[in-house]
Amino acid sequence: QVQLVESGGGLVQAGGSLRLSCAQSRRTGRMYTMGWFRQAPGEERQFVAAITWSGSSTDYADDVKGRFIISRDNAKSTMYLQMNSLKPTDTAVYHCAAGPSEWRARDQWHKYTYWGQGTQVTVSS
């Protein structure tokens, strides 16, 4: 069983930056594609970014391209999301996830097997 724990959320003014971390508590033999999703109150879970196990491929939702950077350090079993130029519309609970078997499923939340509990990001105007 893989456990994921997010950290780094908080309150920031528009235009500011935050760096989220997702620590995997237990290593397994599998090499997971991992992703970040977010969910605002009353809205559906939304894809933010994904990265292959090796880090060689990444993908982003259109509204975060050029502002967010996803990365991972497998030696530390940790994935990151650097969020820059934050907007009030970025306010949500951010979840990390692992597990889609195919890269083409990277933006489909129901294809992910393991989820963290989420960390709140609030961007004030």
Image (spheres, rainbow, N blue to C red):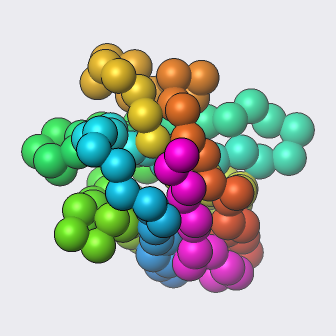
As drawn, 51 above or below 11: above
Locate the C terminus by quadrant.
bottom right
Residue extending farthest to the right is 42
Count of numbered badges drawn on the protein = 0
- Residue 119 position within the rendered picture, expressed as x and y whole percent measured from the top left: 67, 66
Query: Which residue is pictured at 51% across the width and 31% down the height?
Result: 112
Query: Which residue is pictured at 23% across the width and 62% down the height?
Result: 74
As drawn, 65 above or below 84: above
Nearer to me, 111 or 38: 111
Query: Which residue is pictured at 41% across the width and 27% down the height?
Result: 100
Residue 90 visible at all: yes
**Which quadrant of the structure image shows residue 87?**
bottom right
As drawn, 124 above or below 78: below
Along the horizontal axis of the image, is 123 left or right of 72? right
Along the horizontal axis of the image, is 5 left or right of 11? left
- Residue 3 position within the rendered picture, expressed as x and y whole percent measured from the top left: 56, 55
Nearer to me, 107 or 6: 6
Nearer to me, 29 or 36: 29
**Which quadrant of the structure image shows residue 79?**
bottom left
Residue 65 visible at all: no
Q: Does residue 63 belong to the magenta stretch?
A: no
- Residue 94 position within the rendered picture, expressed as x and y whole percent measured from the top left: 62, 56
Q: Which residues are magenta?
A: 1-14
Query: Which residue is pictured at 45% across the width and 41% down the height?
Result: 98
- Residue 99 position within the rendered picture, expressed as x and y whole percent measured from the top left: 43, 34
Q: Does residue 9 belong to the magenta stretch?
A: yes
